[in-house]
Structure formats: C-alpha cells, structure tokens
Amino acid sequence: MKTKKNKKISSLSILSIAGVKPYKKKKNEKYMSKKQIEHFKKILEAWKNQTENKMKYTDNNISQEQINFPDPIDRAVQEEEFSLKLQNNARDIQIIKKIKNTLKKIELNNFGYCESCDVKIGIKRLEARPTATLCIDCKTVSEIRDKQIVK
C-alpha cells in the first residue's frame, strides 16, 4: 500500500491492524484530546485482540500437531518448533500486559506523557509504539545506560 507521498506502509503495522490511518492533528487541537485518546484506544484494542487470537491459534495448532515421530531427528525438529512457538507466546503475553497497562493509563488520564520527565511523548511515536512510556530522549538515555551496565 502506498501513501500520497509514495512512502510504503507496512501491512503489518499497528495502524493497519486497527484499520486506522495516521492521526492528523487539527489546528489548535489540545494534546491527548478526546479524539486522540479514542484513536489510540482503537489501536490498542485491535492489537490486543489480534495478539490474543494469534496465541489461541498457536495453542490449538500445537495440540493438533503433536505426532510421535519414530525418527529422533524428526522429533527434535518438532520439539524445536514447539519451543519457538512457546517463546513467541511468552513474548505475546508480555505485549498483552503492556497493552493492558497502557489502556489503564488511558483510563487514569495518564497516557501520552513520559514517565521520567513528564514531557509529551508525541503522536507519531505513540503510533509507532503505543505502549511507549518514555519520550525519545529518556528512552535513548535509558538504552545507553543499559549498554553501559551490560558491558
């Protein structure tokens, strides 16, 4: 899919999952207005539903695919595939927790502001990562700190 400016949009993006277009802020519109909040609620709910459905499908798929292969190599391949699917499920569980926490922040009128410095996170950043809790500057500092601690 292409936009007017010929930029390619990923069909896997969070916005396309929710069936919404990037938010266009109106002149003099207040940050995190009711319309903006509804925009992000729709994105988060769609993302949550899609992730939950994917997890259900994976769980059903694993239980239906279990075959006792006589060949040890075939068994090992199957176990590795199951392991990868379970790892993806574990990651999806974490995503769902983040989405639920973000929806709770929306209910508490706490959404869209950096947890560290209380600056606006920004519409575009939130569309790219709706569960973001830090502004880009605080996130950058956090990542630099994390790299220094690991090394």
Image (tube, rainbow, N blue to C red):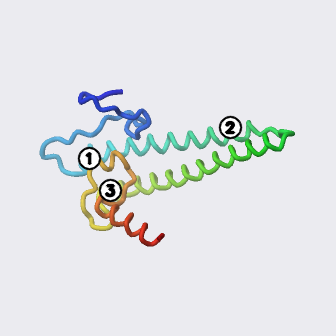
Residue 53: x %, y % from top left:
56, 39
Residue for badge 1: 34
Does label 2 or label 1 sit earlier along the sequence?
1
Decide which of 124, 39 is in the foreground and name it. 124
Who comes first in sequence, dot 3 or dot 2? 2
The residue indicated by pointer 3 is: 111
In the picture provided, is 114 more to the left or to the right than 74? left
In the foreground, 79 or 20: 79
Q: Residue furthest left?
A: 28
Q: Amino acid at mark 1?
A: Lys
Quick check: 10 above or below 127?
above
35 or 83: nearer the eye? 83
In this figure, which residue is indicated by the disc labeled 2?
Answer: 61
**Badge 1 element:** helix
Residue 7 screen position, x and y as percent: 29, 32
Q: Which mark is residue 53?
A: none
Q: Which of labels 2 and 1 is toward the front?
A: 2
Q: Residues within 10 Å of mark 1 (few under 14, many from 20)?
A: few
Q: Which corner quadrant of the image does residue 109 belong to?
A: bottom left
Pointer 2: residues within 10 angstroms few (<14), some, or many (20+)?
few
Q: Is residue 143 left or right of residue 36?
A: right
Is label 3 in contact with label 1 (beta carbons under 8 Å)? no
Give the secondary structure at mark 2. Answer: helix
Q: CA distance from mark 2 to mark 1?
A: 40 Å
From this view, report whether residue 138 is shown above or below residue 36.
below
Q: Residue furthest front?
A: 151
Residue 115: horizontal and vertical position, in percent?
A: 33, 65
Amino acid at circle 3: Phe
